[in-house]
Image (tube, rainbow, N blue to C red):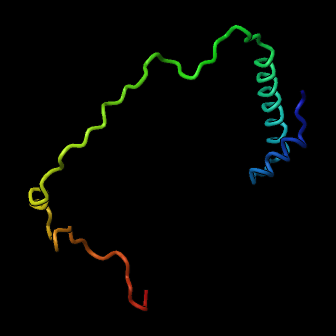
Amino acid sequence: MAITANEVKHVASLAKLEFTDEELQKFTGQMDEIINMVEQLGEVDTTDVPVTSTVTEEVNVMREDVAVKGTDRTLLMKNVPEEKDGLIKVPAIIDESEEG
């Protein structure tokens, strides 16, 4: 299946891309090569090949999800420059004045 410059131009417009004539010719050739490679894969006989959903034999390599008690709040607040009602107080970053 040969890819035409018009088809590449159509795909480019869908992606909101613009190409020069030189780029269009270059990408048309590249797209044609890609399509040919994909068509070659379609010709491979995979009748007796089992379906592969993963490339390793590992089932689950994650640790068990266990809840653990967090660090005490008073210990954490020792490093905070300023706190109010048990929360870290930070400078305002949104200017709510009518000027801003």
Report x, y in % for residue 66: 26, 38
Position of 45 compared to 51: left or right?
right
Q: Quadrant of residue 78?
A: bottom left
Q: Quadrant of residue 8?
A: top right
The front one of 77 and 97 is 77
Report x, y in % for residue 50: 64, 13
Q: Which corner quadrant holds the C terminus? A: bottom left
Position of 41 compared to 98: left or right?
right
The front one of 26 and 99 is 99
The front one of 19 and 81 is 81
Kindly give the residue lying farthest to the top in the view shown.
48
**Image height of 33 relative to 43, above or below:** below
**In the image, what residue occupies the spot 43% across and 90% down?**
99
Q: Which corner quadrant holds the N terminus? A: top right
**Image height of 19 relative to 100, above or below:** above
Report x, y in % for residue 80: 14, 63
Report x, y in % for residue 53: 57, 23
Count of numbered tags:
0
Position of 90 compared to 48: left or right?
left
The front one of 30 and 88 is 88
**In the image, what residue occupies the spot 77% across and 12% down?**
44
Position of 60 compared to 46: left or right?
left
